[in-house]
Amino acid sequence: MAHRKTRSPTLRWLDEQLKPARRHFMQGIGAGVLQSLLMCLAAWLIAHLLDRAIFGHAGLRQLWPLLGVLPLLALARGGLTLMQRRATFAAGASISHRLRQSLEQRMRDRGPLASQEPSSGDTVTRLVDGVDMLVPYYAGYLPQAVFAVAIPAIVLLAVLSADAWSAIVLVVAAPLLPVFMLLAGKAAEQASQKRWLRLRRMGAQFMDALSGLTTLRLYRAAEREARSLASTGEAYRRETMAVLRIAFLSALVLEFFATISIAVLAVLIGFRLMWGQITFEHGLFVLLLAPEFFQPLRMLGTQRHRRMDAVAAATDLMALLAEAPMASNPSGTAVHKPIKAQRVTVSFEHVGFGYDGQREVLLDVDLAIEAGTRLTLVGATGSGKSTLLTLLMGFAQPRTGRLRINGEDLAALDPDAWRAHIAWVPQRAHIFHGTLRDNLLIAAPNVDRFTLEHALHATGLIDVVARLPRGLDTPLGERGAGLSGGERQRVALARAWLRRAPLWLLDEPWQHLDQASAARLEHALRRRTQSCTVLRIAHRLQTVADDERVAVLADGRIVETGVAGRLRASNSLFAQLAAQDHAA
């Protein structure tokens, strides 16, 4: 217990991850230990055969039964080695798979807002390369750390049974190897941490450059960014080589000490053979086992960089798993309450919200939307309009106040059941890899053909389908390559159309459409949502009809509510924003 308390939190966390895969891991350890026992048996058999052949003048007829055992031992050892590697790799792979699932679930729990915090390249590096670095640790270093204790102990007992003085020499020489590993380990660990941090930064820089490639080409900065990436890659190469240099230097020194120790033992056995203090069979048996005594320690030295990589990656993975979900319930109440409603009333009661380390985005927001009514949110950029929708979708929780759905606190509702009541049309529709049909059926996998065709006609997507070479079954490129911005927006609207949800959330859905198309879709949407509750964000205020009810956000507060036509006619903030929008 005292040993566990002195271990670092990262190493204790790595030990915890091993528990579900312990069966595979112990199978590998068992196979490795059994292989070492067969190794001792093979060494004794070789020493015995040579002793009988040289000094006992035994012929092939007397020796062939024992000679026939040697290939069997070699096959058994090879099979056990293969079993050990397969089992420990299976343990590492299962840990990697389970941990990646946990991290993906944590990212889903944190919601879409989490993707806005760190660079996406940094996140991908941690989720992919970071998790992959743990496999060699569990499949290579950790088993070798066990073998570095177990196999020398087995060999030492075998040597002790043959010659006590040789066992003493091994005991005296053995500590030299781990002492040097500890001395070299600190420098190697620091180099490994630095290398991992460089890899994260390089991944983040690459993803940022890739996403901003159009801007870089437009401003003729692509070559400069390429040079910067090349410089970062070169720095990563140097730091990788620094880690490997330390690892190879450690291996060289370990080989040197092991060779010197074996040489000393060989000289001692040679003199004792001349003095008649040890038999040839026992002396050869000890010399055959001496390299195997040091081999696990030497192998552990070559595996140490895997441990350092795993510790560096695990530190970040621990922090990622420890991050609280953005959509967690601050009151601590269970989030299991079901919801099933044909009509939805929304009420924001003194709601406040802010991102970590930033100013408050929403301050004491009071807003009510009756079931079956339509409300348009307007306000300057950064006033908190999109944040209100994010809170309403349950991807974040208010820091203060409550958000009620049909009188129930949203924090107490089952989030998946609640989102099933929402039809969402974002400002920029995301098109997933797959066919156009796949992208539409995300909203309603079991929709019938008639309903699907009705949605295509209503949203004007039928003309898009007609021009595609394979219609609905046309594969779409990454992020909807092959579709225009307006066509992608129609796909998002068709998804919402298929949803049959009582609450519609629209973030300026017509921004990428021409005025005539926007007017036709607006008319169709009003018919489709006659009995639905609709909350819309409007960036272009000329699209807001005079009979629409609007709420104006400014500095995180609702400062005006009313009918758009009346607010336009008065000296209101809405009228000022509309005038600015018209002038622009």
Image (cartoon, rainbow, N blue to C red):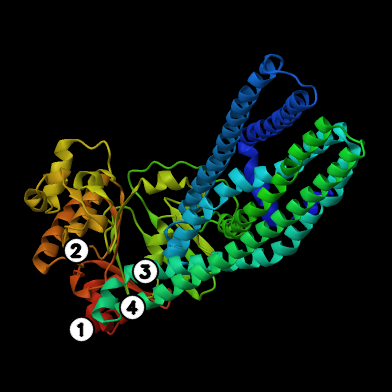
Q: Secondary structure at mark 2?
A: helix
**Residue 560 percent coordinates (x, y):** 35, 75
Residue at 47% x, 67% y: name it: 118
Residue 435, position in %: x, y? 21, 46
Q: Earlier in the sequence, mark 4 or mark 3?
A: 4
Residue 156 x/y as whole percent: 82, 38
Question: Which is more foreground, mark 1 or mark 2?
Answer: 2
Task: Quadrant for the C terminus, please.
Answer: bottom left
The amino acid type found where label 2 is placed reads Gly
* Residue at disc 3, secondary structure: helix
Mark 1–mark 2 Cα distance, whole angstroms, equals 22 Å
- Upstream in sequence: badge 2 or badge 3: 3
Q: First in sequence: mark 1 or mark 3?
A: 3
Dot 3 surroundings within 10 Å: few (below 14), some, or many (20 or more)?
A: many
Q: Residue at x 26, y 73 (%)?
A: 214
Q: How far apart, in angstroms, are the residues tagged by discs 1 and 3?
A: 20 Å
Residue 203, quarter of the rendered image: bottom left
Most foreground residue, 416 or 181: 181
The residue identified by callout 2 is 485
Question: Is there a contact, CB below 8 Å, between mark 1 and mark 2?
Answer: no
Which mark identifies residue 584?
A: 1
Q: CA distance from mark 2 to mark 3?
A: 22 Å
Disc 3 marks which residue? 385
- Say above or below: 57 vs 322: above
Give the labeled residue for mark 4: 380
Judge whether residue 347 can be spotted in this image. no
Q: Residue at coordinates 70% horizontally, 61% vertically from top-left?
A: 185
Question: Which amino acid, by three-letter code, is at mark 3?
Answer: Lys
Q: Amino acid at mark 1?
A: Ala
